[in-house]
Image (tube, helix red, strand yellow):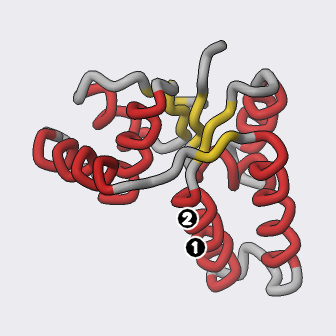
Amino acid sequence: MTLVYSDTSVLVSAYVEEAFSVIAEMWLAGVRPGDLVSSHWCETEIASALAAKTRALQLSPDDRPKLLVMITDMLNASARFIPINQRHFEAAGDLLSRSALPLGSGDALHMAIAADAGAKLFTLDRRMAEAGLGLGLDVELLG
């Protein structure tokens, strides 16, 4: 079993039409049952991303809650959730302090959770992937 952790960019792109949606959809469809791990942090970021797209008029206010339910239902049915605890926040802080490249706190938390679970992190975020690789983490940029 090879555990995989998808960051928010892949999950949202698989459900919302974006430049890399086909790649995100294909990747998600190819994940074997039992291999996907996630965190409730993903759910928070998904809600944030969909709200931002609604404010930017990229999603209708009626579509946002439907998409949120679709994505979270998929995660709840397909993923094993990693409980987030203090060690994840400490590891994220360590990653932030060691990264030579710009790295956001939310991205560092995704990396810390995935690394702790022994999962490969997949993302559509080039900056996140480059920072993770620079830190020696198992990260793959899709697209």
Circle 2 — which element? Answer: helix
As rendered, which of 83 and 135 lies closer to the eye? 83
> Split into 4 quadrants, where in the image is the N terminus?
top right
Residue 123 seen: yes
Q: Amino acid at mark 1?
A: Ser
Where is mark 2, residue-wise? Answer: 45
Q: Amino acid at mark 2?
A: Glu
The answer to whether marks 2 and 1 mark residues whose Cβ atoms lie closer than 8 Å is yes
Residue located 50% across and 32% down the image: 121
Residue 98, labelled with which disc? none
Vertical arrangement, residue 55 with respect to residue 89, above or below: below
Residue located 54% across and 45% down the image: 82
Q: Residue furthest top?
A: 1
Residue located 80% across and 86% down the image: 61
Where is mark 1, residue-wise? Answer: 48
Vertical arrangement, residue 30 with respect to residue 75, above or below: above
Q: Is residue 95 left or right of residue 30?
A: left
Residue located 64% across and 71% down the image: 47
Residue 127 at x, y percent in the picture: 36, 43
Residue 125 at x, y percent in the picture: 48, 44
Mark 1 crowd level (few <14, some 14–19, many ≥20, 10 Å Cα): some
Residue 17 at x, y percent in the picture: 79, 55
